Each structure stands twice: as structure tokens, then as C-alpha cells.
Amino acid sequence: MDRLGSFSSDPSDKPPCRGCSSYLMEPYIKCAECGPPPFLLCLQCFTRGFEYKKHQSDHTYEIMTSDFPVLDPSWTAQEEMALLEAVMDCGFGNWQDVANQMCTKTKEECEKHYMKHFINNPLFASTLLNLKQAEEAKTADTAIPFHSLKMAVVDIYHSRLKERQRRKKIIRDHGLINLRKFQLMERRYPKEVQDLYETMRRFARIVGPVEHDKFIESHALEFELRREIKRLQEYRTAGITNFCSARTYDHLKKTREEERLKRTMLSEVLQYIQDSSACQQWLRRQADIDSGLSPSVSMASNSGRRSAPPLNLTGLPGTEKLNEKEKELCQMVRLVPGAYLEYKSALLNECNKQGGLRLAQARALIKIDVNKTRKIYDFLIREGYITKA
């Protein structure tokens, strides 16, 4: 039986037991005949004689534990790692907090051990890099430099601490600790700049936070300047020479766009709706709304009014592309198949782009009655076409 060290005190860093799938706690068992990958068992499954596929209960095994000394006979490898982790979390010099986090050593013991073996130790004074170079010079004729187990453990752990410190510094310098606040700051930019921000985020670790923010701000300014230049070129093409005329031009342009949108919606309604009475009723209601009047009493009052019958889909374009549940939905909400397919496609594309969709986003995409939008949204959620954000 061998006693080998595990390099982490966190149970979640270890693979689960092959018998009960629980996180392994030291000491645990490693089969010496199975693997790779290593076949690991907790003590409970080992005592029960757990067998699985090629693994048999009579195989030779190793006891995995970090209960062995590394630098000091009175300190185990587990305590060495706990000390380094505590100094990393509490800061150098806060020995009382370090001792409280370790629980197994006193304040004086922690300070004395750390100063002796990690500060004043001549091996670490010359740095592990110099030690590695010296070992490589001695074993230049061999294929692989040899490191003793104890020094390899400390070297690996120091590398992990340095990488963790580097990542913490990047997160702190770039203000990524409050991710929600960071996302809200991103949304102040236009969509094009947000896409650039997402693309350049991977390079944030190379440049400093100030340089990265200056780069993004400069591109945001460039985008605004290009948009203003394009707007001024449009004014010049239209023969506009002063800003008073430009304001009038923008107002008329907005009005024309609204009228064009109304004509487009009306043409779609006339294309799909074959019921002339329903079409005339809709036109009268829209005329009342456009003139600033409330709709007629028969349209606004819910008392005593019969609900509209289901829409007859016979002969309507796009009916053959619907399944039975979709046909039932279109009949109940009185929505023509062609329009439903367009709304469905728009919602699916937005959901795939955003990774989810909210009801408010769906209402912003399809400009129809809010009750119909909710029914379409709930139907697509229920049938699994889209997911909630």
C-alpha cells in the first residue's frame, strides 16, 4: 500500500467515488490495476467490496492521503496547503486570522512556520526558478528533469496561487466583481458598439483597464461621428442648408414612415382576411382611433357582446404549414396562418440570438393586440419552440 498526496483540500476538486458518486474525502482508495482513468472509491464502498466491470475487489490498491510531512515533521501536506490558502485569503501578517481559518495551529505556530520555510528558506530565497535551472544543468543529458515529490507539490501549488492571483487582479482592475453593474454599463452603447465590446473582451487581459476603456470609448465616438456624418450627407442630398429646415425634414420623414407602416399593415390585412364585414369593422375602428375618438360602443363594450366565432382557415395561405395545435391557436385568436408564421419566425430568431425571450420583448417585435401576443408567446413557450429569458 502506498500513501500518496492529494493536491487540494476542496472535495469538489476531486473526482467522485465510482461506487456511490459522492465527493471523495481523504483518505480514499485508488485501484492500482484499473485505469486510466483512475478508479477511485471511498472507504465505505471499499469495505463493501464494490466491483464494477473489470474492477475486482481483490485488486491491489493505494491509499490516497495528504497526511504526510513536506517541510516540517509536525506539519502535514494538508496543513501546508491550508496555511498558504489562509495567507492568500487573509493577507501576510494577519496571523490571528490565518490561525482562525486553519483551526489546527496557533497564531505563533503559523507565523514561525511560514517565516522559516517560505520567507527565510534559502531554497525559496533563490526562487524556485533558479532551483529548476540548477537541476536542469545537472541533468542536461537526461530526457526529463527530475523533481523530488515534496518540491513538486510546492511548485504546483505556487503555480496555482499565482494564476489565481492573476485572475483576481484582472477581475478587480476591470471592475468585473459586480457583473450586473458591468452589464448595465455595456447597454448604454449602441448595438454595434456592444458587439465590438463582446469581441474585444477576450483581449482585456492583455491591455490594462484604462487602455481597454479608451479603446471602446474611441470606437463608440467613431460610431457616433459616422452616424452624424451620414445624417448630414442625407440633409445635403435633400438640399437642406440650415438646421431649422432639418428639423422640419425629420418631422415629415417620421410622418411618412408612420403612414407607410399603416399602409403596409392595411395591405396585409386586406391580403389575408376574406371576411368583408370583419374588414370593414376593423377599418371603422381604426378610423375612430386615428381621429382621436373612442371606438364605437359595440367594439368597446364587453357587456352583452357575443365572443367572435373561431376563424375559418379553409383556403387561407400557409394553413398547410401548421400542425393541429397551431391551427387551433390561429382559429381561437383569429389570426391568419401567414401572419402567425411570420410572428413565429421573428420570435424564434430573437430567442436564438438572445438565448431567451421575455414577453415584453415579444410585444416589441410584433405590433398586434397585446392579448394575442401573450397567447402566441405562451403557446410557443408551452410547445418548447422558445424559452423564457
Image (cartoon, rainbow, N blue to C red):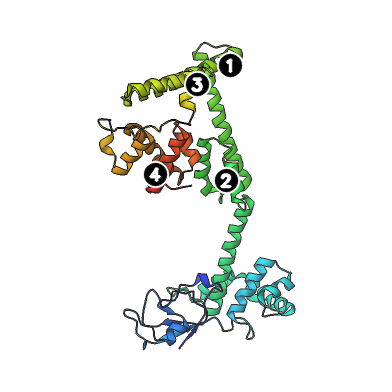
Q: Position of residue 2 (x, y in %)?
A: 47, 86
- Horizontally, residue 332 falls left or right of residue 243, namely left
The label shown at residue 247 is: 1
* Mark 2 and mark 4 residues within 8 Å of each other at the beta carbon: no
Tag 4: amino acid: Leu
Q: Position of residue 255 (x, y in %)?
A: 50, 18
Q: Nearer the viewer, residue 330 or 128?
A: 330
Asked if one can make out residue 336 in the rendered structure from this viewpoint, the answer is yes
Counting residues from the start of the chain, the first of labels 4 and 1 encountered is 1
Mark 2: which secondary structure?
helix
* Mark 4 and mark 1 residues within 8 Å of each other at the beta carbon: no
Counting residues from the start of the chain, the first of labels 1 and 2 encountered is 2
**CA neighbours of label 1 inside 10 A, class few (<14), some (14 to 19), many (20+):** few
Q: Position of residue 232 (x, y in %)?
A: 54, 19
Tag nearer the camera, 4 or 1: 4
Q: Position of residue 142 (x, y in %)?
A: 44, 75
Residue at the disc numbered 2: 183
Tag 1: amino acid: Arg
- Horizontally, residue 110 falls left or right of residue 228, namely right
Residue at the disc numbered 3: 289
Residue in the image at 36% along x and 33% along y: 334
Tag nearer the camera, 1 or 3: 3
Residue at the disc numbered 4: 380
Mark 1: which secondary structure?
helix
Tag 3: amino acid: Ile
**CA neighbours of label 2 inside 10 A, class few (<14), some (14 to 19), many (20+):** few
Tag 2: amino acid: Gln
